[in-house]
Image (tube, rainbow, N blue to C red):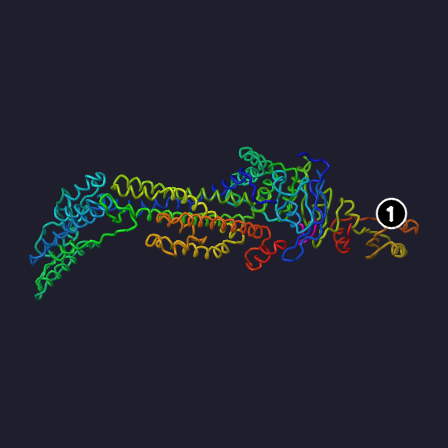
Amino acid sequence: MLENSTLPVLNVNDVRKSFAGKPAVRGVSFEVAKGEIVGFLGPNGAGKTTTLRMALGLIAPDSGTVKLFGQAPGPSAFGRVGFLPEERGLYAKISARDGIAHIACLNGMKRKNALKRADDMLERYGLGDVARKKIKTLSKGMAQKVQLIAAIAHDPEFLILDEPFSGLDPVNQKLLEDMVREIAGRGRTIVFSTHVMEHAERLCDKIVLLSQGQKIFDGDLKQALSHAPRRLEIETPDPKAEAVFTPLAQQITRNGDTYNIVLKPDKEARHVLAESMKATLDLIRFEPEKPSLHEAFVTLVDNGDKP
Amino acid sequence: MSSFPISIRRTLIIARRDFLGYIKTWGFWLTALGPFLGIIFGVLFPLVMSKSEPTRYATILDETGLHASAIEELLITNNTKELEHILRSAARITIPQKDKEAFNKVLDEQGVEAAREMILKTSPVMAKVLNLPDTKLVFISPPANTMDALKPYLMGTNTLTLANQEQSLTGVLHIFERDGETKAEYWSTATGNELVNLADLYFANKASENYMASAGLSREEVLNIRKNALEVSTLNPAKERDENGEQTVTAKDRIPYFFAAAMAMMLWFAVFTGAYMLLMSMVEEKINKVLEMLLATTRFSEIFLGKLIGVAALTLASLLPWMILGGIGLYGAMQFADGAIADGLAKAMSLEMLIFLPTFFILGYVFYGSIFIALGAIAESMQDASTLMTPMVLLLTACIMVVPIGIAYPDSPMLTAAAWFPFSAPFAAVIRLPSDPPLWETLGSMAVLVTSSVFVIWGSARMFRYGVLSGGGMASVKAWFSRVVFRRKNG
């Protein structure tokens, strides 16, 4: 079957899912285009894992539709998708290379090739020494890397990683970020869920924010950051300063000659600078703060904002 | 998404993993080699020990002069009786039915050597191994005339040259009169009590002989009379008359029932070990959190079938030693036994048995295997698995009770009912086969099993999805039924 290259890799349309009458996902819709890295963000219990399971066809939505490579998720996508579930695990009593090769075989590789690929990837990611060790003897970080290798060994077109950074130390988190960048660099599509915004800020082209089973944002990083409050730190001994800043600020905190200002949503740093110049304030320091995704997320959740 | 279409390749990869995962464990090899270990430690090891045991020399210091030779004779008589018993047992399977009476007469009147000659004619190989037990107790004349003088021989201070070797005495049976009563004491530094048992038997026989003699009776005559007691023949009016026009029940008639019982037991064993492995395999994958990853690459039906195939192969591998031993047993029966055994075995392997035995094997395994996979899917830990398995083990144990009923009363209504109950149907239907039940009843049992298996697989699939992906566990069976079975959408 010919596939339209402009088709989204994943299309989730108004899916809903309840467990024991309790809604877990409430009308979530989003798309993932080919080659994108999408961060699937939200606090614990936001419905990220349930949505990703529905995207893979592991559980059926109560209503709504999911299209994976233009079709209902299922066997037609086997081998084209790599999946790292939130709950980590591989066969504990077999070697790392056998565990990776087993999953790669299920994804369509021949056993001989799968074993060779497992050896190569373990070597590349610094686990060559433990290739023949039983998985139960590996450290948590090593086992997690082995599982990630198992998910990508068959070189899938689309990679879904559910909370890939959880439980990893900073060194391994950095290593995993590099792995994700390297896979994305080969034109692969990646969706990963996380509740740690910094990873998404560093890696993602696009962000989908979920809260209490609902999507509260879907767009690129710049758009997401635009929802974060603008902050400024200004140092001036001028007594007129507070009067100049107040019309532009949502909140002002003063500490001596230093003013910490949260701007109103429609104002920007250049407006404050213009007004300060007009009032001939004696500015010692004028420092706009970089908006964070974390603050954007908090704002979006607080406002119940919908795109 | 349909659960039924499957990829054979992925199914076999799952099967291979389960097979290899278990075949490398110690537990598997202990189970598989169990029969051989049993033979080595239960039969061969004691046999070698007994063969390598040194000859023990004992003496009887009989101050009364009345008992020593009689006790020595009793040892020979006992050994001869033991050989007689072995010969009679061997005759049951080697001597044709029509010659059995003549064999008993030869054994009673002409002794063990003549009886062995008779067996030699029908089964030369078996006759070669039928010898007098190799006694390790040898009586010698007392090397001294008093107990005090004999004690150094027991302690090893004094030795005797016997069979060209320096030997010490193992024991001395001292029989003497004191205060008008006969006394017997056994002196020895060893703990073995073979001579004590022999002496006890002798004095017990002597006491009963004396008692009978006081009433004018002879113990020997009583024993002879018992030998000539009437033997009850078993006949079956439903049996076709043999060449002599008789309907006597022979080994040929009984063997099919024992064969069916053995097959039912083997099926039970296969179900028990296989189902246990399936449950443990599923629980292990749940605990290892590997199932979700598998489900992203493999259909549930492929995992389900792969596990059934993998564990079936494993169960067959663990049964292989039993099959080899069974094959050796069959070969032995053909070699050593008379035609009746071979005929009986041929009758046991009837066309019905050859068709329905594998069918019930597969159906029984699939039925129980599906249940255990489902139980494994909802178990959250090994403790959960044990709890869930207990009622199934009790049920399986209750179901195997059909085997003795099937041997004793193959037409029992309870057995017929058991053949219609899915949990006992695989065993009951197999054990009923030799009694030629109506074909529709056997097909009915199959239909019950097929229907139940389909239902169980459907239920297992639901439980599997619920247990694996919803993290439902077995917190509430009632909740599970209401959510998953009856209100599927909310599950």
Residue B145 seen from this side: yes
Q: From the top left corner, tell me how far across and down residue B274 is, in percent.
A: 45, 47
Closest to the observer, B411 or B83: B411
Left or right relative to B352: residue B336: left
Closest to the observer, B305 or B37: B305
Residue B295 part of the magenta-drawn span: no
Q: Which residue is mark 1?
A: A270
Q: From the top left corner, tell me how far across and down residue B141 is, in percent.
A: 9, 50
User: Could you classify mark 1 by the number of other residues whose Cα lies within 10 Å: few (under 14), some (14-19), or many (20 or more)?
Assistant: few
Seen at 7% across and 59% down, the residue is B64
Amino acid type, label 1: Arg
Q: From the top left corner, tell me how far across and down residue A134 is, in percent.
A: 51, 43
Quarter containing the C terminus of chain B: bottom right
Please, what secondary structure does the residue beneath circle 1 have? helix
Type of secondary structure dominating the magenta stretch:
loop
Seen at 80% across and 52% down, the residue is A229
Q: From the top left corner, tell me how far across and down residue A25 is, in percent.
A: 68, 52
Occupied quadrant, residue A100: top right
Q: Chain of mark 1?
A: A
Occupied quadrant, residue A189: top right
Quarter containing the N terminus of chain B: top right
Closest to the observer, B36 or A149: B36
- Which stretch appears magenta? A41-48
> Outermost residue, bottom direction?
B179
Left or right relative to B321: residue B181: left
Seen at 30% across and 44% down, the residue is B344
